Amino acid sequence: MWAALGDITKDPSYFEKALKISKGRFSDAYVALGKYSFEKGELQNSFDYFKKALKVRPLMPQVWFNLGTVSMRLGEWQMALRAFTEVVQQEPETGDAWANVAAVHMHNKHPAEAYPALLESLKYSRNNWRVWISKLYTCIDLGKYDEAIQACGVLMDLRSKKNMAEKIPPLEEKCVKAIVGGTLKQRENCKDDPAALQSSTRSLTRVHDLLEKLSSSTTPEPWIWETLAVFNEQVGNDRDVFDNLMKEYRALQTVPNWEKDDFQVRKVSQVVFQIARFHKQEGSRQSLSKCKLLVSGIIQKVRKVYLDDSKIPGDLEKLEELLQELEGLLKESSS
């Protein structure tokens, strides 16, 4: 009766009365006080009440889940792991509990332990994008790059759905570059193993497909073209590298006020030097003239926004040296 009054009035004193009458054996009253404390932001009290409830009646998976949630908020990671482990032992199909088991292992920097928990979670929550992101990070840490690529593909597909696009963040540059770098390194390390080399070649094909899919998005960012250029150069697709660099250059030009940002000026300068390398290798007067126009255009754009020469980025000096080199090559070609 006292607990029922507590449910109706939301007055914790009724739950305390129920506990007093039951001599601390009424688990539902502890649970109610735990929820009440949690809603009030009194996390330590909530933690204590949930623990007392579970001491009286351990087979309450939802209460274990609540205890795990509070434990994570308090930084009690060992208790959180125990609590969510209890949940999945009592109700193995609770996908969110498996995801939280993985989250605790990830916090503790134990990706090998997080991985199987993530697989279990995805059995029951295939469209949970947060779990896919966790799997992406974990697979990168474990060097499971094929599965990391799969996770990227799923996240892109989920994000393409109209009702999900605003919730799901785009793939992070650092993740994609880690997959590309890791896959290329794996290929380098297995040159003497034909079977492993064949597997690595298939992985590189998947990486290429992922990068192509990213580049075909509505507005691909400059780093995507940069990564494609590096990848194609490493695998010997030299014909595509120049095209990737030009697209990166054009994408960088669309960044608002890039001329005023030292970091962006550096990015533009770096890609211009790479483009110039191809023009110089080609060596024709037409190619060198195109490169000269490109370099001089960049120099003019940057100089226009700096009234004080002492504040001009140091990268501009290198571009001016490149311009002089190109002018010299053009003179040589005409003599």
Image: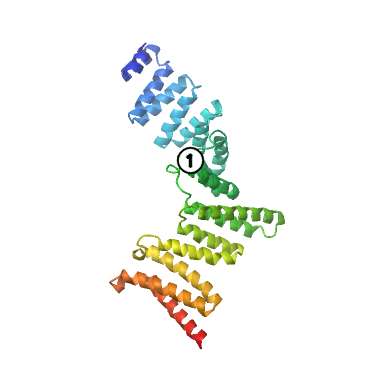
Q: Secondary structure at mark 1?
A: helix
Q: Nearer the viewer, residue 109 or 139?
A: 139
Q: Quadrant of residue 163?
A: top left
Q: How is the image coloured?
A: rainbow
Q: Is residue 138 visible?
A: no
Q: Nearer the viewer, residue 190 or 72?
A: 190
Q: Residue at x 47, y 35 (%)?
A: 78
Drawn side of residue 252 relative to residue 6, left or right? right
Q: Residue at x 35, y 12 (%)?
A: 2
Q: Residue at x 45, y 81 (%)?
A: 327
Q: Residue at x 41, y 66 (%)?
A: 266
Q: Nearer the viewer, residue 136 or 103?
A: 136
x and y percentages locating residue 268 in the rendered image? 43, 66
The amino acid type of the residue labelled 1 equals Arg
Q: Nearer the viewer, residue 241 or 265?
A: 241
Drawn side of residue 223 relative to residue 4, left or right? right
As displayed, is residue 5 above or below residue 82? above
Q: Which residue is mark 1?
A: 130
Q: Quadrant of residue 168?
A: top left
Q: Looking at this view, name the residue that lies furthest to the right.
A: 194
